[in-house]
Image: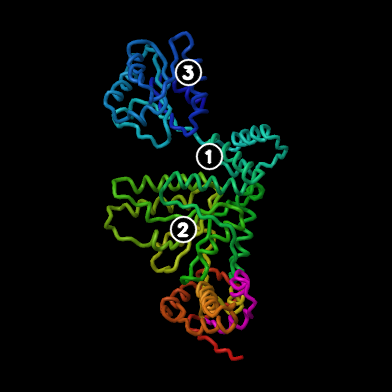
Amino acid sequence: MKYTIANRLRAGAKVIVIQDPDEVLTLQVVESVMTAFSAGKGELKTISGSNPNILDALQDLETKSGFLITLDLLLLFGANPMVCRLIRQVSLSQKDSPSRLVMIEQPGTVIPPGIIGDVEIVRPELPGFPEMMAELTSFREAVGDQSTEDAPAYGALGLPRHEAARLFARSWIEKTTLDPIWIGNEKARRVTDRLQGALQFIPTTTASVGGSKALIRWTDSRGKAFNNPKAREAGLPEPRGVLILGPPGTGKSLTSKFIAYSWGLPLLRLDAGRLFGSLVGQSESQTRMTIDAAEACAPCVLWIDELEKAFGSQGGLDGGTSSRVIGSILTWLQDKIKPVFVVATANDVSKLRPELLRKGRFDEIFYVGLPSEPDRTEIFKVHLAKRNLSIDSIRLATASGGFSGAEIEQVVIDGMFTAFARGDKATETDVLAAIHKTVPLSKTMSTEIKALEDWARGRTVSASDTKFEPATIGRKTLVG
């Protein structure tokens, strides 16, 4: 940034706007550059926009040779015509006038249209790894930490240095160590909270997936190569993401949480409906900010739930806004460089745009169907163990043909409610009774699920090692 500002000044720029969240560091750099540039030419002043003498300081630039640095001037007075006029007068002053104005503003501060052509705008890049490592080293020296691990610096990438320093301090106090996973999660929380838009940080304290062993093996292999310099040296591309299709309740959303948890990465959920705004250009702007925020959280997992609702086939009734937003997302999916692994899920493939399914958007397309009996056994084991119940999962799996993972969890819970009402702990009989009174989705939506299964066969990779069972399978009654 130092050389950028110096070069703009030497090139004759009279007014420069710098939008940077790290005001302290930016001010140090600007004062250093301006001190050298103004030597022998005039007085250098730094003044906050909240200072009542700010207008006098601006007027002095026109009548006297001077150099002025302001803080949040446009944030506080950007809508004031007098301020805009004074800024323009500095910008349009004679070439031989040495006066210069540098305004340090927060990111996102609106630059008035009337002066946007008269000012040079500088938006410094966020700190790269060398700068973040220097901040980490400085912190370690201050607290006497002798470790040399660089993972905390990678975890803080995407934040200004002063925010990263605060996260290092919080981790040191709250976790008694520099925990890179905690730092990455807190960074994602800060970025998404600041955006207050379509991205939401999802905590993943634990995650267990029953069945879907083929999908889990695939994610394990991709996880070893994700954001791994050795994989890049070996010629492997950065894993892009995965599209998971299947009926509702089959564990697609749980898989996205499992991937983030097992890879030790923050999970972001994209609420595509919040990308669209009512004002002209607002949707496109919010899409760009959302993509920037996701990349600022990298390395991370981005979960797009129910892809067909978010980016499915749309009519042309919105003046092309939907097409432009979706086009931006598709281009980013194809060309993204930052390590953002996208997990997209969908229930209805018929509503997906064909371009979402072509190679290059995702590394693979998996189908998570209704679990087979061995998979149901694994799913029952997960939910029974989670609730400290010692029940034969094999017998329950045999009785629950056509049940989804969500329905399996629900019958366990229903059995527990029945047992709690009589003051007892749930038994196999309680869960079996819940199974036999439940009408699974495989019956109420049998036509839709069969159509999805037929489409998936030959077009996708099965998430399970075992052959999925048709949606029309019936439940078995167990006696004894």
> As drawn, is 352 to the left or to the right of 253?
left
Magenta stretch?
380-401
Q: Residue at x 49, y 23 (%)?
A: 30
What's the residue at 29%, 46% (across, down)? 280
Q: How many marks?
A: 3
Q: Which mark is residue 159?
A: 1
- Percent of width and height locating residue 22: 50, 32
According to the image, label 3 marks what residue?
34
- The kind of secondary structure element at disc 1 is loop
Residue 370 in view in this figure: no
Give the mark nearer the N terminus: 3 vs 2: 3
Main secondary structure found in the magenta portion: helix
Quadrant in which the C terminus appears = bottom right
Q: Identify the image quadrant of residue 465.
A: bottom right
The Cα atoms of the two marked residues, 2 and 1, are separated by 24 Å
Real-space Cα separation, disc 3 to disc 2, in angstroms: 47 Å
- How far apart, in angstroms, are the residues tagged by discs 3 and 1? 26 Å
Q: Is residue 383 above or below residue 341?
A: below
Whether residue 398 is in magenta: the answer is yes
Q: Which residue type does callout 1 highlight?
A: Leu
Instruction: State the residue in front, 269 or 118.
Output: 269
Q: Which residue is mark 2?
A: 304
Instruction: Where is residue 325? Give x, y as percent.
Output: 37, 51
- Label 2 or label 1, whichever lies nearer to me, is 1
Which of the 4 image quadrants contains residue 452?
bottom left
